[in-house]
Image (spheres, rainbow, N blue to C red):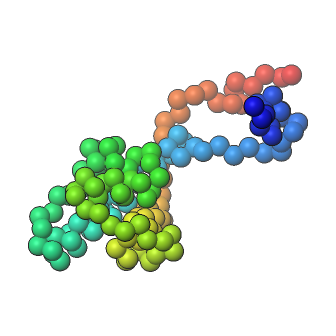
Amino acid sequence: MQQPAHSPRDVTLTRYRASVFDLDGVVTDTARVHCQAWRKLFDGYLAERAERDGVPLWAFDPQGDYRRHVDGKPRNEGIRSFLESRSIQLPFGSPEDAPDEETICGLANRKQRFFEQFLATEGLTSLPRRWPSSSRSARPA
C-alpha cells in the first residue's frame, strides 16, 4: 500500500506558517442566511413554474426541506434533491450558466446571488461562544 505524501505525523507547527479552518456555521450563523437564500430561490422558482405551467405551488419549508434536502450538501446536489421532492427534473447545465437559466447550475448561481445579497444587506450574527478562549487556555511553554 502506498503511503500518502504527508502523514499526520508530518503536521507540525514548524512546518506550516498558517492554517485555514472551515468555520462556516461554527462562529457565525450562516445557516440562517443560507436558509433565507434557499427559500427565496425555491419559492421564486416554484412560483414561476406554477404560473407558467398552471401547477400548484408547494412552497419551501425552512424547517423540513432545509434539513432534508439542502443542509450540508453541495449546492447542486441540494437543488436536485429538493426539486426531485417536488417531482421536478432539470438538466444539470454548466457552472457558467446565468442565474436565470432553468438548469441545476443556473439555479445554483441564482442561490449564490441571493446569499450574497442577504450577506450585504443583513450581515451575519455571531453564535454564542461554547468553547474556552484560546488566550485564556494558553499556558507559557
User: Is residue 135 positioned above or below 17 on the image?
Assistant: above
Name which residue lies at 29% across and 63% down.
Answer: 89
Residue located 83% across and 33% down the image: 10
Quadrant of the rendering where the C terminus is positioned:
top right
Residue 120 lies, in percent from the top left, at: 48, 65
Which quarter of the picture shows residue 63? top left
Q: Which of 119 and 94 is in front in this view?
A: 94
Residue lying farthest to the front in this orientation: 1
Q: Quadrant of residue 113?
A: bottom left
**Residue depicted at x 16% and y 70%:** 50
Position in image of residue 137 (x %, y %): 70, 24
- Closer to the camera, 120 or 19? 19
Q: How many marks?
A: 0
Left/right of residue 47 with respect to residue 14 in the rendered view: left
Q: Quadrant of the N terminus?
A: top right
Question: Which quarter of the figure has residue 138?
Answer: top right
Image: 20 above or below 33: above
**What residue lies at 44% left-to-right and 56% top-to-bottom?**
75
Q: Using residue 62 as the reference point, say whether residue 76 is left or right of it.
A: right
For residue 8, above or below residue 120: above
Q: Is residue 28 visible?
A: yes
Please tell me which residue lies in front, 28 or 59: 59
Name the spot of residue 134 as percent of width and height, x first: 69, 30
**Residue 26 percent location from the top left of the image:** 53, 40
Residue 117, can we see it?
Answer: no
